Image (cartoon, rainbow, N blue to C red):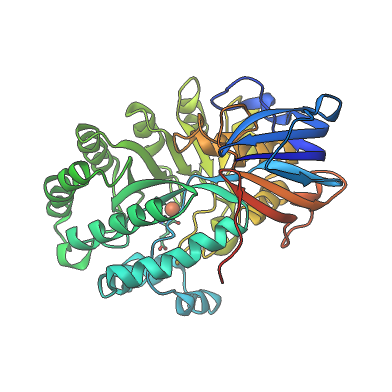
Amino acid sequence: MTTLFKNIKELIQVREEQINFVSGSAMKTLPSIKDAFLVVENGVISNFGNMDNCPNSEFDKVVDATGKMILPSWCDSHTHIVYAGNREGEFVDRINGLSYEAIANNGGGILNSAKKLQETSENDLYNQSKTRLEEIIQLGTGAVEIKSGYGLTADAELKMLRVIKRLKENYPIEIKATFLGAHALPLSYKNNKAGYLNMLIQEVMPKIASENLAEFVDIFCETGYFSVEDTKLILEAGKKHGLIPKIHVNQFTAIGGVQVGVKYNALSVDHLEEMRDEDIAALQNTLTMPVALPSCSYFLSIPYTPARRIIDAGLPLALATDYNPGSTPSGNMNFVISTACIKMKMTPEEAINAATINGAYAMGLEQQVGSITKGKLANLTLTKPINSYGFIPYSFGNHQIEKVYLKGEQITNKH
Ligand code: NIG
Ligand code: FE
């Protein structure tokens, strides 16, 4: 199967050579080709260039993109889209003055979602989750990381991971799975955190490894949740089972989690709303990607990750949604990019780099997706007719997507 996209107004995020990620001032550059063509063969990008060099051979399909742009699909490296039910009651409680912390301390929050998930069958959980997956595909996401962490028992955590595996098998989008058993301490282990961590390490991790249920391990390293010492324990154990760390750190308080992440070669450290200078310094000259989640800041009215300080220090930055029922009930990467520009003062070029190649790196998919590069998967967004790519973040609350393609095939919503 061959497809030619021709007369593309601008082909965005073109990288002739494979790169891993972009950092610092290089994030200000978003390479593109105006008046371009793109050829896809059997789901893979095989050729592209200026229309002057457009091949005139036969193609199975030809798409005329006059006036429209093509970008690599968004790479959303941090989500929790496998969950049961919703928490709009807590949303109203927060409007009425309760804090996120107070709600969690009253048995709401993550424990509320865990209760719902434990009572939900694997099949029902799959059905609830696939609706969200289909939704984000239509919003232009072509690669996604999904975490467990709303199970909080061995059975329920494994149920979540099996649902993720089933989504991987049934959908053309790239999916990576993360074990986040250490998301909150369940009531059954109240005053026995060591026992809970031990259960995750002794009972759940070996099953994850033997059934190949996750690539990454995560922990909520935060005051009132899990400490720096707990984080070391989980990352160390994860390593023994071949799980690479990607951790929740510095969301509400900075307690040294970034340093632990770096020490254990975390692929990413995520949230980072509270960043001390020493946390930024710890990330220098490492292969750990900082990840910002602006929709979470928006929804909880907490500070935004200081993107300017991070990028101006020469570091890379990735953007992701954090789609989850408590802090971010939205998987819209278009909104993430707009919010990054509006609230974090990232330029459109920086935001698009952060949401494509850097997001791909943050989930170990930089060889497969995140740029227009020969040999990469043809996971693409065809925009509506627009004047410039700056219109994408500018038109906040909306999106400029006309069609989405995964492995070269147009994906239309079944619903
Ligand atoms: O990434 N911060 C920890 N976990 C989730 C939210 C959990 C919840 O409220 O359900 C997050 O924001
Ligand atoms: Fe999260």
| Residue occupying the point 86% across, 45% down | 66
Report the number of numbered marks: 0
The image quarter containing residue 18 is top right
Image quadrant containing the N terminus: top right
Given residues 15 and 47, the one toward you in this image is 47
Is residue 105 in view? no
Answer with left or right where residue 125 lies relative to residue 30: left
| Residue occupying the point 41% across, 33% down | 267
Above or below, 388 against 335 in this view is above
Above or below, 335 against 362 in this view is below
The image quarter containing residue 24 is top right
Image quadrant containing the C terminus: bottom right
Which image quarter has ligand 1?
A: bottom left
Above or below, 80 against 377 in this view is below
Question: Residue 120 at what x, y percent from top left?
Answer: 29, 74
Given residues 291 and 256, the one toward you in this image is 291
| Residue occupying the point 35% across, 47% down | 178
Question: Residue 378 at what x, y percent from top left?
Answer: 60, 39
Question: Residue 218 at what x, y percent from top left?
Answer: 33, 45
Question: Residue 39 at what x, y percent from top left?
Answer: 69, 34
Answer with left or right where residue 129 lies relative to residue 231: right
| Residue occupying the point 26% across, 61% down | 159
Q: Residue furthest front?
A: 58
Is residue 2 in view? yes
